[in-house]
Structure formats: C-alpha cells, structure tokens
Amino acid sequence: MPRYLTTQEDLEEIVDKYDTILFDCDGVIWEGDHLIPHVKEVLAGLRKKGKRFFFVTNNATKSRESNKAKFDKLGIECHVDDIFSSAYASATYLKNVLNFPADKKVYVIGEKGIEDELDSVEIRHSGGTDPADNVFIDLMDFSSITPDPEVGAVLCGLDMHLNYKKIAKGCRYLRENEGCHFVATNLDSTFPTHGSVCPGKSGGGATIAPLITTLGRQPLVIGKPEAAMLESILKTSVLTPATSAWQPLPRSTDLESVFFCLRSYDLDKSKMLMVGDRLNTDILFGVNGGISTMLVLTGINTRAEAEAEDAIAKPTYIVESLGDFSSVV
Amino acid sequence: MPRYLTTQEDLEEIVDKYDTILFDCDGVIWEGDHLIPHVKEVLAGLRKKGKRFFFVTNNATKSRESNKAKFDKLGIECHVDDIFSSAYASATYLKNVLNFPADKKVYVIGEKGIEDELDSVEIRHSGGTDPADNVFIDLMDFSSITPDPEVGAVLCGLDMHLNYKKIAKGCRYLRENEGCHFVATNLDSTFPTHGSVCPGKSGGGATIAPLITTLGRQPLVIGKPEAAMLESILKTSVLTPATSAWQPLPRSTDLESVFFCLRSYDLDKSKMLMVGDRLNTDILFGVNGGISTMLVLTGINTRAEAEAEDAIAKPTYIVESLGDFSSVV
C-alpha cells in the first residue's frame, strides 16, 4: 500500500532520503499556464539543499529550449540539460540506438518540438509543420499521397494539425518502405486542461491511433513509461555534476553499462525519486526503472485509484501536492 | 474449405441456386472510378434473370442518392432503395432502434453522406461539414472546445477532414453528456486505391481510432460485419417486390421478427448470397447473418487468406472475379 504523506516528519524524511528527483511537469509543477501553489518555493528550496533535478516530460510539442522558456517565464530555475522530453529522447534514440542512416529522413506527424530535436541531432525530416502537409485533401483525392523511398522512419507525437494527408502518407511509407521504423514519442491518451480532458496533450496516443488501426502494427514507444526514454537519454549523455550538462557516453548496448556510468557519476538509484500525477506513465516509469515514486494528487489520478487492488502501478508515496513540501524546505 | 469456382457448370449452379444477391461495391463492382471488367454485363444479365439485388456498402461518405449517382454514371441499373449504406443504417438505427430524442442532436465526425442520411430521418446534427469545425486550432488553444449539452450522440465515419478540433469536441461530449451514444458507421481500416492502400476508405476505422484511444471506450458499430447493419435496415423497412422500394416495418426488438417479415416477403435466407472482397467485413457479415457467401479476388483478400486455417471467416465460394459470370448470364 502506498504511504500517504501528511505530517511534517513524513515530508522531512523524503527530503532527507532522496538526492535526485525526476519530475513530471504537467499536473505536478503546473497545470496549463498556472503554477501549482507553493511549487515554486519548494523547487527553489530543494535546489538550495543541493538536490539534482530532472524534468521528464512526454510533451513532444516543444523543444527542450522551448520547454526551458516556460520554466524561465514561470521563474523556475532550469537548464536545458535538466530536461528530458520525449521528442529529444526519440531523436537521440533514432540517432544512437537505431543508427539512423544519414541518407534517410524521418516523416514527422507532430509539432515543431519534434522537428527541432531532429535538427539538434542532424537527422533530416519531412512532414511536421510543412505547410504542404498541413491541409485538408479533397474527398477521395489521393493524388498527393505519393511514395518517398527516402523515408526511413515515421515519428509520431501529439499533432494538433493532424489530418488525413499526414495519416495517409505515414501509412504509405510504413507499408512500402522496407525496414521503415514506426516510432511514437509517447502514447499518453489524455491530459488535463481547464477542468476538462482533451485528447493526448503530451499525447501521441490520439495522434498515432489511426496509423496503428490502419496498419495493424504497434509502434516503438519512447516516452514514459517505456524504458526506451531512459535508455535513449542515458546512452547519449551522462550528467556532469559541476555544470548540470550532459556529455556523450561511449556507445553501449545494454542498460547495465548505462547504470554503471550513472553509478560512476554518483547517481544512486536508491536515492532517486520520480514524482508524477499519472499512474500509467510517471509512476509506472519509475517502477520500470527500479526507483522510488511519489504520486501527487494535483493532476490525473486520485488516491483511491493509486490504492486500488488492480492499480497499474503502485507509487511508493502519495502526497496531496508537491506544494505541501513548502513547510520543510 | 471454400469451394473455388472455375468451370461453366460451377458458375451456372450459383446463378440457379440464389435469387437474392447482396453485393459489396468497392473491389467487387468497381475499384475507385473504374468498373471491374465484365461486371456490368453480369449485373444486367442477373437482373434479367429476375435476381433481386442489394448493394451493401460501408462507405458512409455519400448518401444513398449520391451512391446511386455513381451507379447511374457507370451505367448500372440501381434504385435508391437497393442501397444499404452504413450512413443510412446508422441514421435509422439512431432513429428506430435507439429512439433518439427530438430535442437532442448528433455530433458528426464524418462527411456529407452522414449528414444527408440524418436529414433523411429528421435528426438534427452539428459538426460534419460545418466550416467552423473544419479548421486547425492553434497549439494548445482549447477555447473553442466548449460544452454542448444538446449533443446526445457522436457519430463517426470516414472523415477526410478529420482534425483535432473534431476529435476534442467528440471526446468532450462523450465524457460530459450523460448517456451520450458513441456510434461508428463502420470500422474498416483500409481500402484499395491505385495499387496502394489508404486509411479507412469506407473506413470509420482510422477516423474513430483517436476517440477510442482517448476515451478508452468502444463504439457501437453499425456497418459490416455487425448485425446492427441488417437489424437497422430491416427494422425500418421491408422490401416491396413490385417496386424494389422499402416500407416501414412495425417496430420490433428482435431479429427473429425481422426475419419473419423477410420470410413473409419471400426472402428465403437459403437463397441469399453475400458477395464481397473482404473476409473481415463482407464475408463475416454474411456468416453472421447466416447466409451463403462468395469471395471475389478483385479487392483486398487473396485465395490463400480465405483458405487459411485461421481465416476470420470462411466464404462458401471463391471466384476470381464477379466478371467471370459473364459467360453464364
């Protein structure tokens, strides 16, 4: 049963026990454009105590630079390399894990954040925000759905400009181009906004569903709760404590060597805590990674859902809000 | 094992044995805008022999009137009431089976064919081809996804103008409006065109996938291979042999009474044959309905697929093309 944290002593114990904290952002630090109360002071206080932060987000619509801008705007200290986004993780996974060939390109069904991160690792791409693909085609007019043998992967993330042309092109490349990779930044299906729930905010889930249905094929999923997210980031970089900047790692093919590198940089998994508002992404991500987890109740899931017999993942701790720590930092 | 028809005697036997023939259209009669060779003569010859026809199509993008226009253009005799489309079946299902209230409306994610058929049974609707909903919204701008308590059903069919706004509205109504019906004209996932395969031609499959993923809820599916298609049509109408026109049936709640009506109009299931190119829609539809089935190889599925041990449905017969019957009609 998850431990429900309420007293000063409970909260102090957590602050003492963990030195590296992985945060989900939406529903934990902010909701939309609004900071969750007291979270700003809590983060500043934890930094002051020397805690190391990682902001782990499935939101693939923005680059890490753009994500950082949101922290800046909200007055929260953040460095680009503190941010793990599913867009960046997808780009580095293609580059470093799948050895994506230089003569191929990626067809993007998604927003600018994915294009920016592909640019950052020098992978060519098409689709995405290209105006030619952000149009409605006429009923039963398939003349623009032409082959492109250069496409070696179709990468999907939340696309608020999703349309039939993009879906049809993605399907065509995946059917016709031998070895074409089918990759999703993440499969989140919903996200909270203004008291309602809309399809797939961080959310490749709604975007990629038509392709999965049409192709009868499952994508490789990079974002939380998949191990690929961690694998991708860790294969590419390790933390340099002095600067909070990541340096390239020697290529390795198994997670063990990655954890060896982590250990060599004093990242002790027993002192790592994943904080999130969703059982099926954040908490499961922490559980899959073998670290402690804390559910906050300022987002998607409730205490009852976390304590249910058949919960998809059980957090180590539950706390009403990250803001509750303001009294102990 | 399906019987593979090749000889003159085989084909003559089929023509003699069945007096009512249900045809799928795409991949059987035409492919895109092109008639399949010799099919025109075959249909004319079968009509001359007094066979009764039903054109059963999951294509919900066109009204029955528009479907008829295609037959007219291709020079094939067809009456509006010969046509069973999943759009018409969905409208009549809402009206006659679900008793859709007059003070509610249907939110349409689909093309004009669905709107036309809702009009034909006097059900109000929104969405669909309304220009206000056929736009891309800005990234993370949910201001136009407002509640509408009048929406009592969300009806989805293939929508080549599918966009995030429609998906988000559909999700909102289904989440917030108590008792809101979630209906799909059909779940076809692909269709043949110009030698390639594009998402969901007849095909609600690709259109509705984002809603299913976001909501974690399955729709009521009307089109082939579901029994609802037949139930809906038969509950609404019975064939009047003299005019090929359908008349309203007394309301009934079970399929048995429908079949009683069918029998009373001399529709003998042992003399009915469903002809189609897909195992998972056409052939399964016939099998579910308890009638004989014939797979043609001018569309989606192959002979090997139909003969496979684990075929989703086994046709009674397989023939290369409906056009093969030209020598016996």
Image (tube, coloured by chain):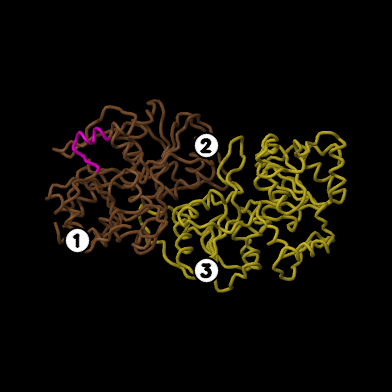
Chain colours: A brown, B yellow
* Quadrant in which the C terminus of chain A is drawn: bottom left
Residue type at tag 1: His
**Near-viewer residue (A262 or B240):** A262
**Near-viewer residue (B209 or B237):** B209
Residue A80: where, in percent of width, then height? 22, 42
Instruction: Tell me the magenta residue range.
Output: A259-269
Which circle marks residue A172 in the picture? 2
Which residue is farthest front? Answer: A1
Say which label, 1 or 2, has the lower sequence index: 1
Query: In terms of secondary structure, where does tag 3 sit?
Result: loop
Left or right position of A327 against A93? left
- Chain to which the residue tagged by mark 3 belongs: B
Query: In terms of secondary structure, where does tag 2 sit?
Result: helix
- Chain to which the residue tagged by mark 2 belongs: A
Please give the residue where the numbered disc 3 appears in the rendered image. B179
At x 30% / y 56%, what residue is drawn? A295
